[in-house]
Image: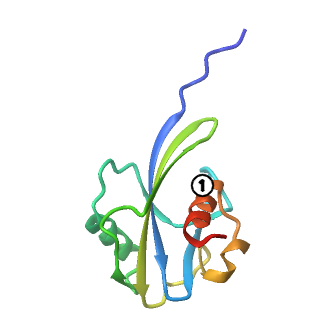
Amino acid sequence: VKLKSKPPKKRIIDYVVLETKECLIFRKRTGNDIWKGLHDFDSIENLEEPSAEYLKNEIIKKHPEISISRQSLAPEREYSHILSHQKIKARFWRWKTNGEINQNSIYLKVLKEDIDTVAVPRLVHKYLEDIFSI
């Protein structure tokens, strides 16, 4: 007897793409969530209508050593991504930064010309294809 499966969990992810003149700053996913071991960007989850100011404050809390030199007031791109157990709505905010981010075990600064060498989830890869034509 086949049991009815649970409906997919809905998630909203707001990715903040931190960018310097030459590099993008990736974050390695840890824990027991989706895409463990792959790289994506800093993110905040499950905000229905996020404001750029709220996101900026959250990023500055995580990275007090940087400053945001230019930020978008709305997401640059938005995607829907369906996994077997989750429906993901992802919004990508692209911001220019000044300062050096504290590169520890989960953050990776990658030259824009080398971004195709970073292991990322398909959702992030689609964004990188659309923006940087990798």
Q: Position of residue 102 (x, y in %)?
A: 51, 84
Q: Position of residue 67 (x, y in %)?
A: 36, 85
Query: Considering only vertical position in the picture, is 16 above or below 44?
Result: below
In the rendered view of the protein, which quadrant contains the C terminus?
A: bottom right
Identify the residue at horizontal 60%, vertical 56% (top origin).
Answer: 31
Q: Secondary structure at mark 1?
A: helix
Is 80 displayed left or right of 76 in the figure?
right
Q: Is residue 129 among the parts visible in the rendering? A: yes
- Along the line of sight, which residue is nearer the eye, 107 or 121? 121
Identify the residue at horizontal 56%, vertical 84% (top origin).
Answer: 23
Q: How many marks?
A: 1
Identify the residue at horizontal 64%, vertical 35% (top origin).
Answer: 84
Q: Position of residue 129 (x, y in %)?
A: 62, 65
| Residue that carries the numbered disc 1 in the rendered image | 123
In the rendered view of the protein, which quadrant contains the N terminus?
A: top right
Identify the residue at horizontal 65%, vertical 14% (top origin).
Answer: 3
